[in-house]
Image: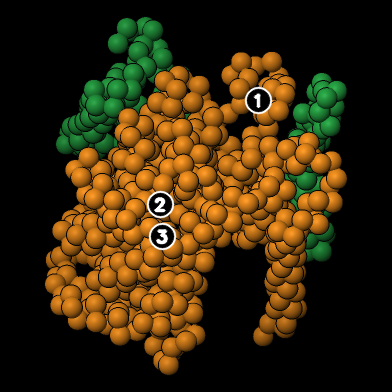
Chain colours: A orange, B green
Amino acid sequence: MIDLLANGLVQIVQWKYLLPLLLGTVAGVIGGALPGVTITLTIIVVLPFTFGLDPLQGLAAMTGVYVGGSAGGLVTACLLGIPGTPSAIATTFEGFPMARGGQPGRAIWLGVWASFFGGLIGGAFLILVTGPLAKIALAFGPWEYFSLFILAMAMVAGLAEASLLKGVIATAIGLLITVIGTDPIMAVPRFNFGSEFIGAGFPFLPVLIGIFAFAQIMTDIEKMSAPKMAGAAGAAPSLRVAHLKVIGEILSRPFLLLWSSLVGIVIGVLPAIGGSAASVLAYDQAKKFSRRPEKFGSGVPEGIIASESSNNANVGGSLVTIMAFGIPGDAVTAVMLGAMTIHGITSGPLFMVKHSELAYGIYAAYILAHVLMVAVVWVCALFLLRIVNVRLAVLAPVVMTLCVIGAYALNNTMQGVYVLLLFGVIGYVLVKAGFPLAPLILGLILGDQIEINLIRAIMTDDNPWLFVTRPISGGLLLAAATSVGLAVWQHLRHQKKVAAAESEPNF
Amino acid sequence: MPLGRDGIAGLIAAALGLVLFVQTFAFPQMPLVPVGPGFYPRIVLAAMVLAGAGLALQDWRARRGAGAEAEPLRLSLPGRLVLAGFAIVAAYCALLPVLGYRLATLLFVAIFQAALEWPRQARDWVWLAGVALATTVVTYLMFESYLLVLLPRGSLTGW
């Protein structure tokens, strides 16, 4: 393992790979710093640039975006009080008061170094755990795969903030999109209504880009007339700080660092939950464990360390799930999965066996991206404050152009562009109707595999009870049922609380 | 009692699911395969119909419980800018194969910018034109020359 990792590192420091990794990290830090531009949108914008690259170059660029974006959001969170990405929301609670209290350098560098250490802990987990998990997954039959995918979808639908029913409908829409085209066993046409346009089904990436990018950009455009938050006016703040002292501040809290990173990793491993949940949960845990919880909100370093170490460790967790099981941990890894498919690589347990050099190249890129992220923030922190002033009127057309190129360049046909437009409208309507997009995307990604494994299992043995009686499959289905049961229970408890609060007399 | 946003969304999901569910019975059955091509879609669509009906019922019950206090449904139409945005992007997609990538993108970036923020001074117009030109030239050179993506040519313009 050490040899393979060393080989990966030697490979990734060659200019051929280092340059895409560096450019990806820069794009990630900038995209992360721009309020309203999420890491998912940044990776969608970077995607078409990776089509002409070899697989490791493309995946290195995307890993750079992922790592850079997870740290980029903290700069604007600390200096402007506006989280650049949702995963920097918890950093704002402490970073902004600390910066306003005259310590902007300390706030930013506590965040950057905490991201660095959290990311490395996530990296260690990624390297040590992916291989063994993939070996376990290799022993899976179609029953276990089917049940694993059902568990992933049950968790995501159950975690939908709006309602469980909306989560189920969104999941069903995602699955339905994969059904359109031809059936995977006998190639019988399904729901194409005689149209050549959808005869072969909808290509995955244009659907994903349409749903995410359109919904995001159009929602941002809708907010254009809303009053803007006051930024940090006046002279540029000094970010000079004694780095060893800041690092010492973080390492003197080893339990906090490890626990927050662990929270990030676990949330990352769970499908489609993402960095924002990880950072808020780690922040909440830091507050609960703190000896001075009442000080939280006034600029305490523990809050920044917890939030930032957790959201970067989360990246490592997400990569484990995609590499070991082929299930994306979040929307960013969903795009990475799509990019792998374009290069003819199938993720999942066989990926570690068939493409071990590529896998260790990704590990190496992940580790090196953290070093580059520190260097990029070091050089660009103040420059980023200028970039965040780029107006949406300029940003939106440029981003949309890159989305259109991304959809077109998949097959060099206009079909992808029309699919992008169609699903852009659908995605926007669903967001406006309050439907969560994460379950839809997971359904879209896993739909084909769920059907193939279900049919394969039935064709192998038509006894349906095998899904329940095989120990791993049964355990996974039980976990799925528990997840849904918990979601229903939480929903009912919440409704009771609301009803009780409303029935109290209001004096 | 009129339905709210969730209720209408649930009914639409249930109706769509039901129509497609019925369609699955028209799929040909394969004698050698234990389950046909309609087996899996039926499971998905049944879940969609049940969840859609459940959502509509939940919304109806919630609104009935709220009684007179239940707010009437207000269809919030997207803002003028969003509608303009969709129209401009749709026009861009339609014109790409007609005008070709270079001309269509130049126009798209310029018009979209102007629609989102109308230029007030000569300097703003120069900036708008500069961004449109730079986006077109940089993306064209990057994708055609470096990444070897053959971008759309215009049937009308030939370039």
Amino acid type at circle 2 is Thr
* Identity of the residue drawn at 71% across and 76% down: A497
* Identity of the residue drawn at 73% across and 65% down: A482
Q: For residue A88, say whether it is visible.
A: no
Disc 2 on helix, strand or loop?
Answer: loop
Asked if the residue under mark 2 is in contact with the one under mark 3, i.e. CB atoms within 8 Å, the reply is: no
What chain letter is assigned to the residue under label 2? A
Disc 1 on helix, strand or loop?
Answer: strand
Disc 3 on helix, strand or loop?
Answer: helix
A141 vs A71, nearest the viewer: A141
Q: Residue A190 lies in what quarter of the image?
A: top right
Residue A175 pos. (x, y %): 67, 40
Q: Same subunit under labels 1 and 3?
A: yes
Q: For residue B144, say whether it is visible.
A: yes
Amino acid type at circle 3 is Ile
A240 to A144, vertically: above or below: below
Q: Which residue is identified by label 1?
A: A181
Q: Nearer the viewer, mark 1 or mark 3?
A: 3
Residue A29 pos. (x, y %): 29, 54
Q: Nearer the viewer, mark 3 or mark 2?
A: 3
Amino acid type at circle 1 is Gly
Q: Residue A316 lies in what quarter of the image?
A: bottom left
Which label's residue is closer to the chain start, 1 or 3? Answer: 3
Side of A226 where A167 appears, left or right = right
Q: Which residue is identified by label 3?
A: A127
Side of B83 where B35 appears, left or right = right
Q: Same subunit under labels 3 and 2?
A: yes
A59 to B36, vertically: above or below: below
Q: Quadrant of the N terminus of chain A?
A: bottom left
Which label's residue is closer to the chain start, 1 or 2? Answer: 2
Q: Residue A38, which numbered label?
A: 2
For label 2, the crowd category at 10 Å Cα-Cα, with few meaning under 14, some 14 to 19 and many 20 or more, is: many
